[in-house]
Image (cartoon, rainbow, N blue to C red):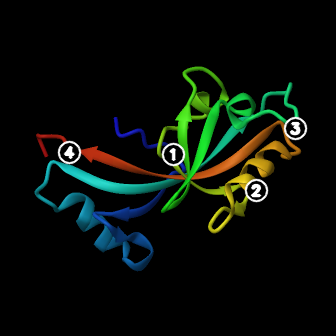
Amino acid sequence: EAGLKRGDILISVWSKLTGYLSLREILDLLVNKSAIEIRCLIERVAAVAINPDKTMISGTEDLIGASFVMEMDGLSISAVKESGSAIEAGLQNSDLVMAIDGKQTRYMPLKKAIELIKRSDEGDVKLTIRRKAIIWRNKEL
């Protein structure tokens, strides 16, 4: 129900970065807390099909069905069309885009990020995204 998928990378649990924790510590955070929700940060790579009728003057809404904005945390998805390849790939508003086709977006200007999407040689563009997820505990546990 939290929208997690096989292959998602667990970045943090309760704002504690998992890269600095042992597996036992991560499991303790996931299982031994008394709260009925678990707040996590996940990362995944989404392959988003590019509209084959793209032109160099097309906006990202026409290319993949999503628009972007540069925020304090970095490149974020500001809107996802109700139909199109972005929604089919599972992208959501407020997803943080960490990389485009493997190129890190940190400190990348918005214009350059959009150009990377437009110039993708494949039939799709691979967006590495991060998002917050809330996992609700089963009351019986």
- Residue 11, percent from left and from top: 44, 63
Q: CA distance from mark 3 to mark 4?
A: 47 Å
Q: CA distance from mark 3 to mark 2?
A: 13 Å
- Residue 10, percent from left and from top: 44, 59
Q: Residue at x 85, y 30 (%)?
A: 54
Residue underneath mark 2: 112
**Which residue type carries mark 4?**
Arg
Q: Residue at x 34, y 56 (%)?
A: 40
Pick whichever of labels 2 and 1 is earlier in the sequence. Answer: 1
Q: Which mark is residue 56?
A: 3
Residue underneath mark 4: 137
Crowding around mark 2 (Cα neighbors within 10 Å: few <14, some 14 to 19, many 20+) is few
The answer to the question of whether label 3 and label 4 lie on touching residues, with beta carbons closer than 8 A, is no
Crowding around mark 4 (Cα neighbors within 10 Å: few <14, some 14 to 19, many 20+) is some
Q: CA distance from mark 2 to mark 1?
A: 31 Å
Q: Nearer the viewer, residue 98 or 55?
A: 55
